[in-house]
């Protein structure tokens, strides 16, 4: 199981890098334009992915990341958002590399105030699945703006990407 999640971690970091590079081709106005996506704009969707990752990291560390809502904007500035994304990806990598028991339960309080308990492997799997879901939305929005993210299939990730 550990090898699988190490692969998902590499893919997560690689895809995030591809996506941020593509988003960097846009103007700030284009990134922030409400395109009727679930979170409105590309920028807001990037913020949401980051926010959700920080929620999960807080659950793993036992230091909850408090938010006002799942649409809370963490960064108005795209550069700051990118820097935080890179730091957060490193934190996710650290969590993945240090988990000793993938079957152990993670107990946390969700955003509705309900205490939950799920296996660690399910929580980590959700982090990667959630990000992939919303990155797919962003790639569609980018395509509508004429920006090609390129091939993002796991099998096409460069073998030497670490």
Image: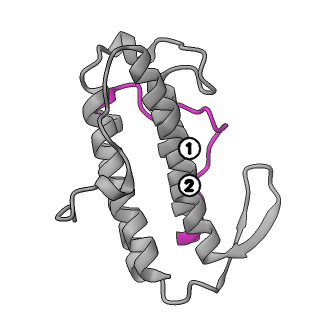
55 displayed left or right of 114: left
- Colour treatment of the image: one colour
- Displayed quadrant of residue 108: bottom right
x and y percentages locating residue 122 in the rendered image: 64, 70
Q: Which residue is mark 2?
A: 129
Report whether 63 appears left or right of 108: left
Find the residue positioned furthest to the right.
114
Residue behind mark 1: 133
Asked whether the viewer can see residue 63, the reply is: no
In the displayed image of the protein, which residue is found farthest to the bottom?
A: 100
65 lies left or right of 97: right
- Residue 158 part of the magenta-drawn span: no
Mark 2, secondary structure of its residue: helix
| Residue 76 is covered by the magenta coloring | yes
Residue drawn 38% across and 12% down?
Answer: 30
- Highlighted magenta segment, given as a residue range: 59-79
Q: Residues within 10 Å of mark 1 (few under 14, many from 20)?
A: few
Q: Are marks 1 and 2 in contact (CB under 8 Å)?
A: yes
Q: Position of residue 27 (x, y in %)?
A: 29, 13
C-alpha separation, residue under disc 1 versus residue under disc 2: 6 Å
Residue visible at 42% across and 32% down in the picture:
75
Q: Is residue 36 above or below residue 95?
A: above
For the stretch drawn in magenta, the main secondary structure is loop
Which quadrant of the view contains residue 22?
top left
Q: Residue furthest left?
A: 160
In the rendered view, tell whether residue 79 sits above or below residue 159: above
Quadrant containing the C terminus in the rendered view: bottom left
């Amino acid at each position: 199981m550990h090898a699988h999640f190490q692969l998902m971690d590499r893919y997560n970091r690689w895809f995030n890098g591809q996506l941020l590079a593509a988003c960097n081709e846009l103007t700030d106005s284009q990134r922030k334009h409400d395109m009727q996506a679930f979170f409105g704009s590309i920028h807001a969707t990037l913020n949401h992915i980051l926010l959700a990752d920080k929620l999960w990291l807080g659950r793993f560390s036992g230091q909850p990341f408090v938010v006002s809502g799942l649409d809370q904007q963490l960064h108005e500035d795209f550069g700051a958002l990118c820097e935080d994304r890179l730091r957060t990806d490193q934190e996710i990598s650290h969590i993945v590399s240090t988990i000793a028991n993938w079957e152990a339960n993670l107990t946390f309080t969700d955003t509705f105030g309900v205490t939950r308990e799920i296996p660690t492997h399910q929580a980590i799997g959700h982090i990667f699945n959630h990000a992939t879901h919303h990155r797919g939305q962003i790639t569609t929005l980018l395509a509508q703006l004429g920006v090609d993210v390129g091939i993002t299939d796991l099998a096409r990730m460069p073998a030497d990407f670490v």
